[in-house]
Amino acid sequence: MSRLSSLKTSIIHRIWLLKGALHYARKIGVDVEGPVYFYGLKPGAFGSEPWLVKLGKNVHIVSGTNFVTHDGGTLVLRHLDPDLELTDRIVVGDNVYFGMGALVLPGVTIGSNVVVGARSVVTKDVPDNSVVAGVPARIIRTFDEYLDSARKRSLGFGRLQGPEKDKALRAYFAKKYDDIK
């Protein structure tokens, strides 16, 4: 594949991530205040009741993140009580990031200024200004502590995009590691 063709594919993929996935989420009933950014959204990420999921503004959802609005375990209990149903909404505030493979369970409200770590399972409400991680997810630091730590470790390339960012990262890591060109 030529570099130009690869670039076109990358641009189309980014448009899908930013526009197509958002359109899809709204179409299936997710309440999106927006803007919301999807990175690798797959059908089914919002479960069987997507209309019970509400997303605030500046929400970033990375691939593998799932919002589950019901407890499917009741299926094995329905022979004892056919009316069992455990379903509830999920509400996400503003300025929230979901790491790869995060799982949010029914009845959870996630506040604003929150980072949910990769592979975390969110079983309880998350207060504003928190970073949570783990199974089950628990608060590991405040949002401000995370910001301070990120500033100290930053490479300084956050404003760059596409080929320009790739070039800067390659140059940085080529100086740091002998085996990277």
Image: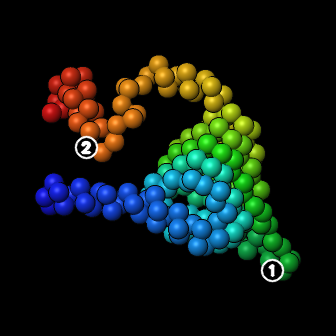
Mark 2 highlights which residue?
A: 163
Task: Give the position of the C terminus as an image quadrant.
Answer: top left
Mark 2 and mark 1 lie on one chain; the one further toward the N terminus is 1
Between marks 2 and 1 in the image, the one whose residue lies nearer the viewer: 2
- SS for tag 2? helix
Question: Between 25 and 33, which is closer to the camera in this rendering?
Answer: 33
Task: Decide: is 149 above or below 126.
Answer: above
Residue at the (36%, 31%) spot, across then down: 157
- SS for tag 1? loop
How far across and down, in percent of the image, does residue 6 sit?
Answer: 21, 57
Label 2 environment density (alpha carbons within 10 Å; few <14, some 14–19, many ≥20): few
Mark 1 highlights which residue?
A: 79
Question: Which residue type carries mark 2?
Answer: Pro
The tally of labels here is 2
How far across and down, in percent of the image, does residue 14 sit?
Answer: 38, 57
Residue 156 falls in which quadrant of the image?
A: top left
Q: Does the image show residue 141?
A: no
Question: Which residue type carries mark 1?
Answer: His
How far across and down, in percent of the image, does residue 29 sit?
Answer: 65, 71
Q: Which mark, residue 130?
A: none
Residue at the (58%, 47%) spot, across then down: 58
Residue at the (25%, 43%) spot, across then down: 163
